[in-house]
Amino acid sequence: MKVVTSEERQTRRLLIVVAFALLLAFALVVSMAFGSADITLSNVWHTLWSSQLTTTQDRVIWNIRFPRNVVAALVGACLGVSGAILQAVMKNPLADPQIVGVSAGAGLAGVVILILFPALEYAVPMVAFIGAMLAALAVYALAWKNGIRPTRIILAGVAVAAFLGSGISALLVFYGDRVQGALLWMVGGLAGRSWPQVYMLAPYTVIGLLLAFLGARRLTILSLGDETAKGLGLPVEQTRFLMTAVAALLAAGAVSVAGLIGFVGLIIPHMARMCIGTDFRYLLPASALLGAAVLIISDTIGRVIFSPVEIPVGIIMAFLGAPFFLYILRRSA
Amino acid sequence: MTVALQAEHVHLAFPQKTVLEDVSWAVQEGQISTLIGPNGCGKSTLLKVLVGALEPSKGTVTCKGEPVRKLTAKEMARYMAFLPQAPEVPADMTVEELVYCGRFPYQAWWKNTAGQDREAVEEALEDTKVMHVRHQYVTSLSGGERQRVWIAMALAQEPKLLVLDEPTTYLDINHQFEIMELLKRLNEGRGLTVLMVLHELNQAVRYSHQMAVLHNGLLEAAGSPDEVMTEDLLRRVFSVKATVEPGPYIRIHGLL
């Protein structure tokens, strides 16, 4: 049997991260050649490097397709890393951003605005972000009893999600004539997202990812179990608390801009882990890059497959994600 | 002789029942100390209180004279290493990677500790004789090797005190002795203080300098194996008929 040394393992992991980065760059650029306006890859390349926008194609690329891809990348990276953190912290392979209440909080806040105050539609991201963070705080408060236990968080998350979900359902039933916008929000999509959303989401992403990467080593230690981690000098409760907060921040930013896109936070960490293993110094960047690439690719499929009708990326993700989810379930059982 | 860990009048009560009652015991530096007692007597709990993983309801635990709760987690981890009974490890972690985790209490993002880390890890792999499996997955090893690997991780912490919760429980007799001999060698060679919970009485007697017997949350007896192991104590605590032969060696004749 050939012995693989630690150095070789490190190099391999680094190469996989680089490969994911290349995949992201490829998806980012090539996907811009797809869409209802007829644009070739050389147009895209030319526009990205030119200093001014002269043709309509230039404007389509620079003001519509490129920023939309950047939003997709940021959302995918946030959800992927958020899921990777939560699966580690909750010690549960089925954990994802929904379990800290983020999706339900953002969902209800968004639906309230879209249905009751449609004139304030522009405020949806901000209100959704507040809703997401409030819901995460509520889950925390309910789960807190001499520290945070994973099972209590999961149970509190389920309870809060069900409670807020009943609010969403009630609104949808009472205002059946106005559900269109709300439904799109609940499914999650990137239609019409452009530079303003990039500017809104970028700071959360940068700060969140930075904090996540700083905690990578701690997450690896936590994977040895609470008792061993404590013995190694890791403040387990504090780590769990802080990293859950980072995950909530990342997910709240993502859903506030793109709506309730499911499955990214669940399946991306699993895909990344299959390729790269459990060392979080590599797993977190890999989840970010893979999440970004997969969301861009899914969004492109959604834009193109039934063109000119657009399928929201949330539907594509769930359509691809659900079978994969079952595959994981059967493999781990 | 200096005291490594000291429990003074430690009580621990959970809502349903009292687990420890007025336990006072000192672990001497440089010795092998063993806690024994029947199932559910509170010995694992006392171990967790001693390493600071559980806070006593009453009483104090001091580490070299300092109250344990005043020490930071990393300070504690640099003084003592704790191996739980059934530790977890991710399926894709190699022996070397796991042993490197033992360096966590020394690492910080502003410090370059690579040189010292490497030295400590190499020495730990050497001392526990797991050098030949360093690039294999921990989960692929046999029970005995795996236990040695965990001890290697603990040694990479460069502790003065090694605390183990039933280190031989899941091993066959050969590997049980291998672990006990390893601990003895580390105690004599490195001057490592060892504190552990054991089930096998004759192992405890043979390898320990000090023993403590817990029974229903109370400290029944403490001292050298000669002082502690009496036929009367075995009858009272373990409900067995036994004779203590010179050595000492405990021969169990049957249940009471």
Image (cartoon, coloured by chain):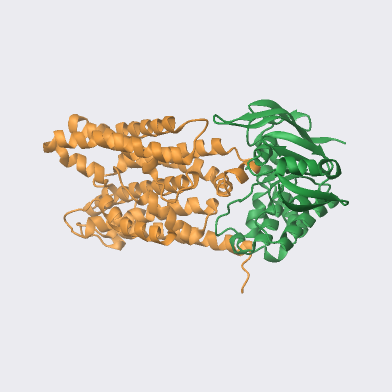
Q: A123 above or below B29?
A: above
Most extreme residue toward the top is B58
Task: Give the quarter of the image for residue A9.
Answer: bottom right
On the question of residue A194 being in view, the answer is yes
**Chain letter for the green colouring in the rendering:** B
Image-based side of A169 in relation to A223, left or right: left
On the picture, is A166 further left or further right than B212?
Answer: left
**Percent of width and height locating residue A131:** 33, 32
Image spot of residue A64 (x, y percent): 26, 48
**Given the current orientation, which residue lies at the most extreme bottom position?**
A1
Front position in the image: B94 or B118: B94
Image quadrant holding the N terminus of chain A, namely bottom right
Please state, as top left, top right, bottom left or bottom right, where the C terminus of chain A lies in the image.
bottom left
Q: Residue at x 34, y 53 (%)?
A: A295
Residue A299 versus residue B208: which sits nearer the camera? B208
Q: How many marks?
A: 0
- Of the pair B219 and A186, the residue shown nearer to us: B219
Chain in orange (letter): A
Q: Closer to the camera, A159 or B231?
A: B231
Residue B109 placement: quadrant: top right
| Res. A106 in view | no
Answer with left or right where residue A304 lies relative to residue A8: left
Decide if residue A249 is on the left or right side of residue B226.
Answer: left
Which quadrant of the figure has residue A43?
Answer: bottom left
Vertical placement of residue A1 versus B132, above or below: below
Question: Residue A297 in the image: x percent, y percent?
Answer: 32, 57
Q: Residue furthest front?
A: B256
Q: Residue at x 64, y 50 (%)?
A: B101
Q: Position of residue A126 (x, y in %)?
A: 32, 32
